Image (tube, rainbow, N blue to C red):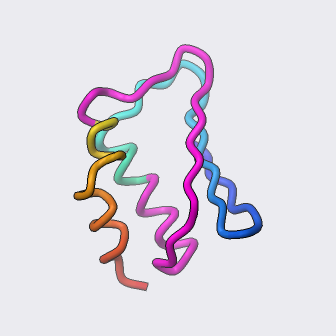
Amino acid sequence: MSSSFLKDDVVHAHFKNDVLGTVEDVHAMFEAIGKERNGRKGLLVVTVGEHSTLTNEARALASGRKEILFWQQMPS
């Protein structure tokens, strides 16, 4: 996975080709974004390469309130 930090508080996260994203990947993504942005919120755009997807658990976590709260509570 790679992340780009664009203007106007836009964060682009990209899962490369042939990746099955897991819960651990989602946590790592939010942790990396939180550290780079010093805990500040932003607009997150996620793209995936060919033949890539998230597990059901990772998808639920990434779009759920629990992960958002985890990201907001990260120390700066």
In percent of the image, x 28 and y 66: which residue is there? 70
- Residue 36 belongs to magenta span: yes
| The N terminus, quarter of image | top right
Please count the marks in the image: 0
Q: Position of residue 19 (x, y in %)?
A: 49, 25
In percent of the image, x 50 and y 72: which residue is there? 41
Q: Establish if 73 lies above or below 66.
A: below
Residue 35 falls left or right of residue 43: left
Residue 30 falls left or right of residue 52: left
- Residue 73 belongs to magenta span: no
Q: Establish if 31 lies above or below 27.
A: below
Q: Position of residue 36 (x, y in %)?
A: 57, 72
Q: Position of residue 43 (x, y in %)?
A: 57, 60
Q: Establish if 67 lies above or below 40.
A: above
In percent of the image, x 60 and y 35: which residue is there? 47
Q: Indicate the quadrant where residue 30 lies.
A: bottom left
In the picture as drawn, the residue positioned furthest to the bottom comes out as 76
| The C terminus, quarter of image | bottom left
In percent of the image, x 56 and y 42: which residue is there? 46
Q: Which residues are magenta?
A: 29-57
Q: Indicate the quadrant where residue 75 lies.
A: bottom left
Q: Establish if 54 lies above or below 37.
A: above
In the picture as drawn, the residue positioned furthest to the top comes out as 51
Q: Position of residue 60 (x, y in %)?
A: 27, 39
